[in-house]
Amino acid sequence: MDPLNLPDYSEILESIQDGLVVVDEKLRYLYLNKQAEKLIHKPSKTLIGKKFTDAFPNHNLNISGLIKKVKKSWKEKKVATLEIYFKPLNKWYSLIIYPLNNKFSIIFRDITQEKNLRKDLQNSKELLDVIFKHVSDGIVIQSPTGKIIYANEAAAVMSGFATVDSMVDAPLSTLPSHYDIFNEYKKPLSWKDSPGELVLKGKKESVDTVLCFVHKKTKEEIWIDIKTAQIYSNPLQKSGAVSIFHDITVLKRLEQQKDNFISLISHELKTPLTSIKVFLQLLQKQSTKSNQPAITNIVTKVSNNTEKLIKLIQSLLDVSRIQEGKLVLQKKSFSLPSLLNEVREDIQPITNHPISITVKKDTIVFADRERILQVLINLLTNSIKYSKDSKKIIINSIEKNNEVIISVKDFGSGIPRKDKYEIFKRFYQSHKHATFPGLGLGLYISSEIVTQHGGKIWVESKKGKGSIFYFSLPLKKKSTLHTR
Ligand code: ADP
């Protein structure tokens, strides 16, 4: 401190993290702080009084150009800020230059690392741009308000925009008006249920779905598999959504041909099988009447197998209905305990597995009774089929928020972890090597029935220890506990 109590400025200048150099108009060094010495790798005493051009004879700077720039900025009452590459030291510096009574003070810092990083980023951005441009999948990035901030060529083509530029900056809701958009069951898709909206409004973290775009005039269908996910700029900050569009029209067409074929065959088989069943019943009556036990026995076996065939055909028809979006639900309020008892009464006589039920008395659900019965029969017959040794089966039901969760627990073979989600897909069978009857459709149909009721279906299982299948349904009213 000086006698006037002013602070010692040189101490401050020495302590700052930026380099500070003062040169006269001939660019002779007048002052360098410690940081400046470090940054240019020369001690102050070898530089003071020396010209910059003598200290660095091989420099690459356009000095007169720099001075002009500084003076111009100064005239405009602006500070000259520059980024320069300094060849003798192979470094990038950012400079702030102040002219000061025929002198220049220069504050500078090393930005080589930052510059390289920016270059790397630019290179990877260019690389990504090239990749995104040439992939056949469409890629769209939306801002938090739904505006498109990035789209690649494929995305523009798939969604009917003439060019990428006409797509960028438009909200996705302005999809060219020549398309009607449907969900995978061919039901019209409201904008609020579109993948981007669900993710941007925070209703879902990510969406994986299939949409169908139908051209209004030509009625041509384009099927797109869409995966949409939140983007985070840091772990807490949501900064938009990214969607990947994969055109599956060809696959869908083949699938539709297969479905049409299955649907046609099932319809054709259903009528003759139903009459075979009726004739068999007649035959059964006749043979019992005329006391022909051998024939009765054979007719009963044929009858049972016909029944199995009819059930298989029924499943195939259900799959067709689901695929065509024609699974109609006839919802009404009904008593869950009475439905569960009915299921047990149907199944218990044909199995040695003891079935127990726990359900709140007077639990009323609002659903399609026949279809829920179908789900329960499927879960129960699976529990029996996949647990040898007649182990017990426990049906449980608990109420949570505005829904009821029904579970069917067995102590059978269980399901490997990798199949936990797969078993709900069409034709998927986990026990591929074992010989169990079935087509792998029951859980698919059950899951479609439950989801179309607005519920969820899932499984908890340990291989060899058993499984618990759960599904939820909307509740009609609350009630009191009753355990059997
Ligand atoms: P299916 O029983 O006709 O094969 P499902 O769709 O009902 O078809 O079931 C799909 C697959 O899930 C079955 O093939 C089986 O491997 C597995 N699975 C279903 N329920 C159970 C269960 N309770 N325990 C063990 N595995 C099961």
Image: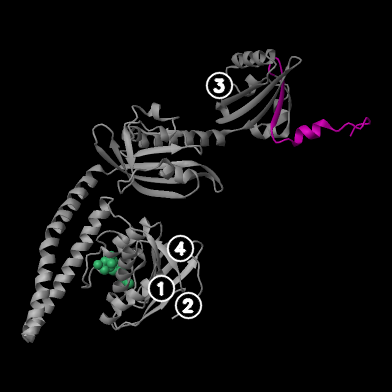
| 475 up-or-down from 142: above or below | below
**Residue 286 is one of the magenta-drawn residues:** no
In the picture, measured across the screen, residue 21 lies left or right of residue 370, that is: right
| 233 up-or-down from 41: above or below | below
Q: Secondary structure at mark 3?
A: loop
In the picture, measured across the screen, residue 378 lies left or right of residue 255, that is: right
Q: Which residue is at a point 44% across and 74% down the rendered structure image?
A: 359
The residue pinned by badge 2 equals 482
- Quarter of the image for residue 9 reads top right
Looking at the rendered structure, the kind of residue marked 2 is His
The residue pinned by badge 3 equals 60
The dot on residue 475 is 4
- Quarter of the image for residue 4 reads top right
Q: First in sequence, mark 3 or 4: give its number.
A: 3
The residue pinned by badge 1 equals 337
Cα distance between the residues tagged 4 and 2: 17 Å
Q: Residues within 10 Å of mark 4 (few under 14, many from 20)?
A: many
Could you say which is closer to the camera, residue 168 or residue 56? 168
Q: Are marks 1 and 2 in contact (CB under 8 Å)?
A: yes
Which percent across, then down, holds residue 403? 46, 63
